[in-house]
Image: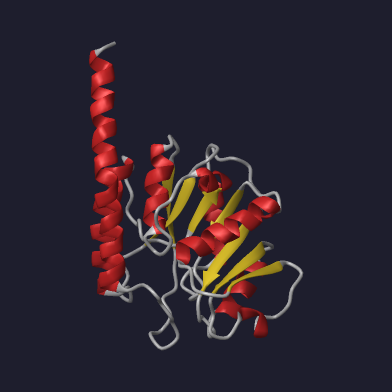
C-alpha cells in the first residue's frame, strides 16, 4: 500500500551542466505537472540564470566551479530540506527523463525512507549499447553490496528521502549515485524500483558528461572500497549468531 503523496509533497531537483538545448524544456515539463523545481547549475560556462525563464516555482543554485553530480544533488537536497520537503525527485537535464513519470515513482513509495529508482526499459531500439553493458556491469555490484534486486543502478531518475543527507560519503561525481544506494541500504533502508518510460534525444541534442571508462572505473572503485566493510559486517553478524 503506497503512501498518499501529492505533487506538493515532492520537489524536483535537476542537476545540470551545459544542457543549454534541453534544460528549459525539462523545467517547463516539470512545471506543467505542478511540481516546484530546484535547478543546480554545476559550473555552467554560461550561467543558467542568464537564459532560463524566471519563475516563482523555480529556484536556481549555482556552483561557480564544477563539483560533480553527487555534490549537485546534495546541494539541492539541502535546499529541499530548508523548504520543508521530506522527499525529492532527481532527474537529468538532458531531456531523457519525463516529468509525467514522477507520479509513478511517488506511487511506488510504501514506507518511510525508501529510495525509488526509475528503471529504464532497455529493450527498445534506440538505447545505446554502451549504456546496456554499463548497466549490467554496475547492477551486479549494486545487488551484491545492497542485498536488493536492482536492474538499473545507473538511472539518474530517482526519488530520495531527505534522510540521505545524514549519510557519510566519499564520492561526489557520478559514482555518488552508486555510493548513496549502498550506504542507504546499509543504514537499514529499502531500495525499490519501478519501470519508467524515457526519451533518448538525438546525439546532436543530448549533452552527457558520463565518461564510459573513467566513470565506470570510479563506480568499480566505490565497490572495492566497500568490500572490506561488507566482509567485516558479515563476519560480525556470523559471530553474533554463534554467540547467541
**Quadrant in the picture for the C terminus:** top left
Instruction: Look at the picture and state if 100 lies above or below 161.
Output: below
Residue 69 in sight: yes
* Residue extending farthest bottom: 204
Relative placement, left or right, of 200 versus 134 is: right
Relative placement, left or right, of 10 versus 121 is: right
Which residue is drawn at the image coordinates 29% and 46% (left, top)?
226
Count of numbered labels shown in the rendering: 0
Q: From the top left corner, tell me how far across and down residue 1 is, in percent.
A: 53, 36
* Residue extending farthest right: 56
Image quadrant in which you'd find residue 3: top right
Q: From the top left corner, tell me how far across and down residue 82 is, in percent.
A: 69, 52
Question: Observer-nearest residue: 177 or 22?
Answer: 177
Residue 138 in sight: no
Instruction: Look at the picture and state if 190 lies above or below 98.
Output: above
Image quadrant in which you'd find residue 234: top left
Image quadrant in which you'd find residue 177: bottom left
| Colour scheme of the rendered structure | secondary structure
Question: Observer-nearest residue: 215 or 154?
Answer: 215
Which residue is drawn at the image coordinates 28% and 25% (left, top)?
237
Q: From the top left corner, tell me how far across and down residue 189 is, in percent.
A: 45, 38
Instruction: Look at the picture and state if 92 lies above or below 172.
Output: below
Which residue is drawn at the image coordinates 26% and 17% (left, top)?
241
Q: From the top left corner, tell me how far across and down residue 168 is, in percent.
A: 45, 46
Question: Observer-nearest residue: 83 or 152?
Answer: 83
Amino acid at each position: 500500500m503506497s503512501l498518499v503523496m501529492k505533487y506538493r509533497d515532492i520537489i524536483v531537483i535537476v542537476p545540470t551542466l551545459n544542457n543549454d538545448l534541453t534544460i528549459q524544456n525539462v523545467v517547463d515539463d516539470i512545471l506543467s505537472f505542478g511540481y516546484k523545481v530546484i535547478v543546480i547549475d554545476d559550473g555552467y560556462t554560461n550561467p543558467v540564470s542568464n537564459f532560463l525563464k524566471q519563475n516563482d516555482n523555480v529556484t536556481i543554485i549555482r556552483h561557480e566551479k564544477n563539483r560533480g553530480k553527487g555534490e549537485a544533488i546534495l546541494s539541492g537536497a539541502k535546499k529541499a530540506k530548508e523548504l520543508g520537503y521530506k522527499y525529492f525527485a532527481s532527474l537529468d537535464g538532458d531531456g531523457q527523463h519525463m516529468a509525467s513519470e514522477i507520479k509513478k515513482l511517488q506511487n511506488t513509495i510504501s514506507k518511510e525512507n525508501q529510495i525509488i529508482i526509475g528503471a529504464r526499459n532497455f529493450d527498445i531500439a534506440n538505447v545505446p549499447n554502451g549504456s546496456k553493458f554499463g548497466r549490467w556491469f554496475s547492477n551486479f555490484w549494486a545487488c551484491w553490496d545492497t542485498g536488493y534486486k536492482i536492474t538499473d543502478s545507473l538511472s539518474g531518475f530517482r526519488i530520495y528521502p531527505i534522510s540521505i543527507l545524514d549519510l557519510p560519503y566519499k564520492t561526489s561525481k557520478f559514482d555518488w549515485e552508486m555510493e548513496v544506494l549502498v550506504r542507504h541500504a546499509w543504514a537499514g533502508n529499502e531500495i525499490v524500483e519501478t519501470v519508467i518510460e524515457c526519451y533518448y534525444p538525438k546525439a546532436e541534442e543530448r549533452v552527457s558528461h558520463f565518461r564510459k571508462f573513467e566513470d565506470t572505473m570510479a563506480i568499480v572503485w566505490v565497490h572495492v572500497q566497500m568490500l572490506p566493510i561488507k566482509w567485516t559486517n558479515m563476519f560480525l553478524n556470523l559471530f553474533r549468531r554463534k554467540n547467541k
